[in-house]
Amino acid sequence: MKKRAIVFLAGEFEKLPPNFEFRSDDLIIAADGGFKNLVDLQIKPDFLVGDFDSLDQSLLKIATDWQVVIENWPEQKDLTDAEIALDLALKEGCQSLLFLGAWGGNRPDHSLGNLALLHRLLEINIDALIYADGFFLRLCGPGNYRILGKGIVSLIPLTSVVTNIKTEGLFYPLEQENLYIGASRGLSNQFLEEQAQISFETGLLLLIWQGLLPKDF
């Protein structure tokens, strides 16, 4: 099984995915204010990284008491705390990353920047997911994908066109069809049953769904 990093960021966080379980070999990284979420869960991370501009000093003391490895960065830097955590995960040999607290809050620029990090990981063939408000976000290149859950499924093209999309297990099926950026046709589909399949030939597709962590993640 691929070595996995669980990265806690300082955006909105309510709970872990419904079928998520920590594994003994998970690398747990807290980025700055994301450490608070781990304190609330009473889970010790392996690393705490960032410039700590959004981390209360009392929480920093907890990290010290827990003997967390702390990497303190200057506030004036060229990387976000999320990208610092990403680089650390790659350095430690992780092949998949799950981001929690990567969306929402009062910084839409950070939310979009975190989404952009998925593109960097896609280019080097690293599996990556954002989980936020009961939804998973996954940036997909051409290929076949299986998702699990119930409720809403949205397919959002991030290139001018995504070609030859085929779906199975969705209420509104696509049969070798194209989706175009700027058009909303792929939004608000629905699971017919717990599993759905999506495949396409060219382009970049942002896949968003309510439900469960993929079994192979």
Image (cartoon, rainbow, N blue to C red):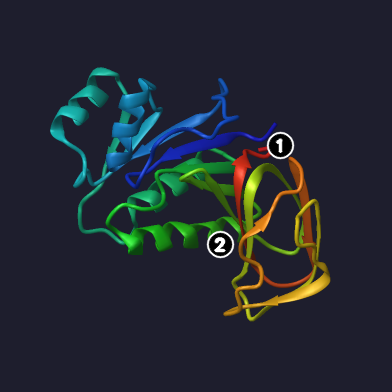
Residue at x 27% of width, y 56% of height: 106
Q: Position of residue 84 (x, y in %)?
A: 38, 49
Q: Nearer the viewer, residue 33 or 187?
A: 187
Residue where numbered disc 2 is placed? 119
Q: Residues within 10 Å of mark 1 (few under 14, many from 20)?
A: few
Asked which quadrant contains residue 124, the reply is bottom right
Nearest-to-viewer mark from 2 and 1? 1
User: Quarter of the image containing the C terminus?
Assistant: top right
Left or right position of 15 against 164: left
Note whether residue 162 is visible.
no
Q: Residue at horizontal 35%, vertical 20%?
A: 42
Q: Along the horizontal axis of the image, is 36 left or right of 215?
A: left
Q: Name the kind of residue labelled 2 in the image.
A: His
Q: Is residue 86 shown left or right of residue 160?
A: left
Residue for point 21% across, 29% down: 59
N-terminal of the pair, mark 2 or mark 1, is: 2
Answer above or below: position of 165 versus 111.
below
| Circle 2 Cα neighbour tier, 10 Å, few/some/many (<14 / 14–19 / ≥20) | some
Q: Quadrant of residue 36?
A: top left
Compared to residue 30, the image places residue 186 above or below, namely below
Say which residue label 1 marks: 216
Name the mark on residue 165: none
Q: Secondary structure at mark 1?
A: loop
The reply, left or right, for residue 202 in relation to residue 70 is: right
- The answer to which quarter of the image holds residue 109 is bottom left
